Each structure stands twice: as C-alpha cells, then as structure tokens.
Image: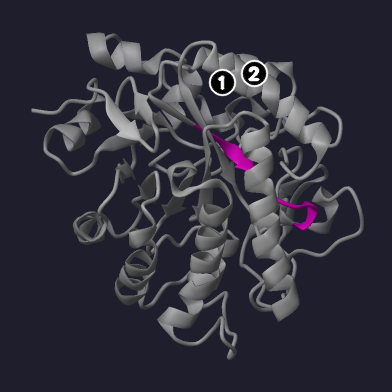
C-alpha cells in the first residue's frame, strides 16, 4: 500500500514524501519593489520537510496584484530576491514551485503602487471586501479586459514563468482557483462576455487553456502545474455548469503531461472522483474539511488512492516540521487564524477562514 511517506516523481523530480505545503498568501513582501525578504527564505527553509512546497501567490504583472505586500515575479529585483528562497530550500534537497496568481477583479486601487484599476473578464463587481493598508474596503468595478490585453496577460504569465526558472524554482503552479483571474474567466457570473472568451463552457475555458499551453511551451510541461477549485464560491464566484466546464478544461490540457493538477475541494467534494478519473498525471488534493483543517486523518486519502499527494495549509504555519510530526504521530499546534486581516499578518493566509487550508 502506498503511504504519504513514500516518494513520488513530480515532473523530473522525485519527492521525498507525498505531503505538500499549500500556497498561502503571507503579505510580507517588504523588500524593494515588493520582493521577498530574508525572512521569506527562512520561512520556506523551515518548512522544507514537505515533499513539495508551493509558494504564496505571486503576481505575474503589476495589475495582477490583489493584496498589499504580495510578491511579484515580473522584474529583475524580484527574481534576485526569490533566488535566496530557492537556494535555501534546495540546500535541504527539496522541491519548490512558485504559484503564479493574477487576482483579476479581486483587488483595490489602494493596493497598487501606481494609479490602476483592477481588471477582469467583464466589468462585474465582486461582492465583499478586501484588505488594504487603510483597512477593509469594498471591491471595485473592474475594467473589462480587451482581446489585446488578454493576449498580453498570457504573455505576462509566460514571462513570469521564465523568471521563476531564472530565480531557481523547480516549476510554477498556475492559480486557477479561489475566484482569481483564471477562475473568473471560467465562471458564469464574473464572465459575461459574448466573444471568444465567454458564453459557452468551452469559450470560458479558453483563457485558462491558453495560459497553460503557453507556459508549458515556454518552460516545459514537467515544470508546469495548475490549481483549480470547482464550484468554489470564494470571492463571489458562481459556476453553474462546473460539471461540464472542468472536464472540458482537463480534456484540453491532459495531453500536455503537466507536473501535476492541484485540486482544492470546497462545496463539491463529490466531484473529485470525476476529476481524478479524468486526469492522467499526478493528482494533488487539498481536501474539504468543513469546520476543521486538513490533519492526520486526511493521510488516508493517499492510502486509498483518492490522491497522489495531499496539501496542507494552516498546519504548516504553526508546525514548520509538519511532515515529521505526522510521521511520528506527534501533537500538532493549531494555527491562530484570529490574526488574519487584523494588521498582524503572522497568521494571514489567502483564505483566512476557509476550512481546507
């Protein structure tokens, strides 16, 4: 029987175990031009017991930033700063992927370093609020992306992926989940376009497919992964036809031979077996754990073949040596999520109250 502590090959790398550190926004990019600091290198190195580390969401361009003090991978200063992080993880013989996250309409003008308005597939304002340096504020109406801007954004993902490799990352995970830009295009409420990127499920999947294909062509399939969260309502997303949209998406990208598919379960865990059967490659799962968090009991998902790798979020914040603790059955320290959005970002994550991180 395969267990969480057996090795597995991801891309061209053999992971030491099947426990992944999930991507979690930290909002601590206090370095020049919003780059990671020495603290980031220490933070990730402390957690290098994970078979695979996926970084905090990292914007591929300036307009792709949603939250304050999140890092980028779109200029040389950022690339050089990330090199310290990848060196620290590689010194321990581990694998680290950069998550590329364009937040689309999930942003606010106060969070940019220059006068900008968030963009999205359509000019549809998301319900809810976002953290800014001045506190919580309502989302704004995004500017609808033109066809030329869509094409440029694909190129920006490609450029950021190349920058990630230059910074020493082993690959990139494209963030197509949690209500950010790729999922906004997939959705039935944030995307009201009537052109080639809107309307039918196939058209709405086109942008995500284009990004995955372009990044794969640039850095190779073994260095490219995708994260999705079907039917996830986070950030005011509706996906009325997710049971049709996601099989079409996987059908298009499955032949590429990506490093892995990362599925975040939310309201539709019953759909996970469908995705598992549709995906030929490595299947990473961040399982739904209502009113709780991913813990020791979720290791059985590897034992029974539900997933090849299980990703953990919250527990990695408070247990840097989480894989070792899981292996020996040691007590686990719970993360203090009350600090999320409270000015002290010690416990801040991408989804501070979400049960699956």
Residue 184, label in figure: none
Choose between 146 and 130: the one closer to the eye. Answer: 146
**With respect to residue 190, does 177 lie above or below?**
above
The residue at 42%/80% (across/down) is 201
233 sits left or right of 125 in the view = left
Farthest residue, direction left: 1
**With respect to residue 92, does 123 lie above or below?**
below
**Residue beneath disc 1:** 44
Q: Is residue 129 visible?
A: yes
Query: On the image, which quarter does residue 312 sit in?
Result: top left
Residue 96's spot in the image, x, y percent? 51, 29
Choose between 218 and 260: the one closer to the eye. Answer: 218
Q: Can residue 329 be seen in this view?
A: no
The residue at 52%/38% (across/down) is 171
Numbered disc 1: secondary structure: helix
The residue at 45%/44% (across/down) is 354
180 sits left or right of 163 in the view = left
Contact? badges 2 and 1 (CB < 8 Å): yes
Q: How crowded is mark 2: few (under 14 residues within 10 Å), some or many (20 or more)?
A: some
Q: How crowded is mark 1: few (under 14 residues within 10 Å), some or many (20 or more)?
A: many
308 sits left or right of 339 in the view = left
Residue 106's spot in the image, x, y percent? 66, 59
Residue 115's spot in the image, x, y percent? 91, 58
Question: If the image is split into quadrants, where does the C terminus sit?
Answer: top left
Residue 12's spot in the image, x, y percent? 40, 34
Q: What stretch is highlighted in magenta?
A: 54-63
The reply to whether the magenta stretch includes residue 55 is yes
**With respect to residue 162, does 345 lie above or below?**
above
283 sits left or right of 36 in the view = left
**Residue beneath disc 2:** 41
């Amino acid at each position: 029987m395969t267990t969480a502590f057996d090795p597995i090959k991801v891309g061209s790398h053999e992971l030491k175990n099947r426990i992944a550190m999930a991507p979690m926004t930290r909002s601590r990019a206090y370095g020049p031009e919003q780059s990671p600091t020495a603290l980031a290198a220490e933070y990730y190195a402390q957690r290098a017991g994970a078979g695979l580390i996926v970084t905090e969401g990292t914007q591929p361009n300036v307009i792709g930033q949603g939250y304050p003090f999140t890092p980028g991978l779109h200029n040389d200063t950022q690339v050089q700063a990330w090199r310290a992080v990848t060196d620290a993880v590689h010194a321990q013989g581990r694998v680290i992927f950069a998550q590329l996250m364009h937040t689309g309409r999930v942003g606010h003008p106060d969070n940019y370093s220059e006068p900008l308005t968030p963009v999205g597939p359509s000019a549809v304002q998301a319900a809810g609020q976002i953290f800014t340096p001045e506190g919580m504020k309502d989302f704004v109406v995004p500017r609808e992306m033109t066809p030329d801007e869509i094409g440029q954004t694909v190129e920006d993902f490609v450029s950021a992926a190349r920058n990630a490799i230059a910074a020493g990352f082993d690959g990139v995970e494209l963030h197509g989940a949690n209500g950010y830009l790729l999922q906004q295009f997939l959705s039935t409420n944030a995307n009201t376009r009537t052109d080639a990127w809107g309307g039918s499920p196939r058209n709405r999947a086109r942008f995500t497919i284009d990004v995955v294909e372009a990044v794969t062509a640039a850095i190779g399939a073994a260095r490219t992964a995708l994260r999705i969260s079907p039917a996830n309502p986070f950030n005011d997303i509706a996906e009325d036809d997710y049971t049709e949209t996601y099989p079409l998406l996987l059908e298009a990208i499955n032949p590429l031979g990506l490093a892995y598919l990362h599925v975040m379960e939310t309201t539709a865990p019953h759909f996970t077996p469908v995705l598992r059967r549709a995906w030929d490659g490595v299947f990473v799962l961040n399982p739904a754990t209502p009113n709780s968090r991913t813990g020791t009991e979720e290791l059985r998902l590897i034992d029974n073949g539900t997933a090849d790798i299980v990703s953990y979020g919250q527990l990695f914040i408070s247990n840097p040596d989480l894989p070792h603790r899981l292996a020996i059955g040691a007590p686990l320290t719970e993360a203090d999520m009350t600090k999320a959005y409270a000015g002290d970002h010690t416990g801040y994550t991408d989804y501070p109250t979400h049960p699956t991180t």
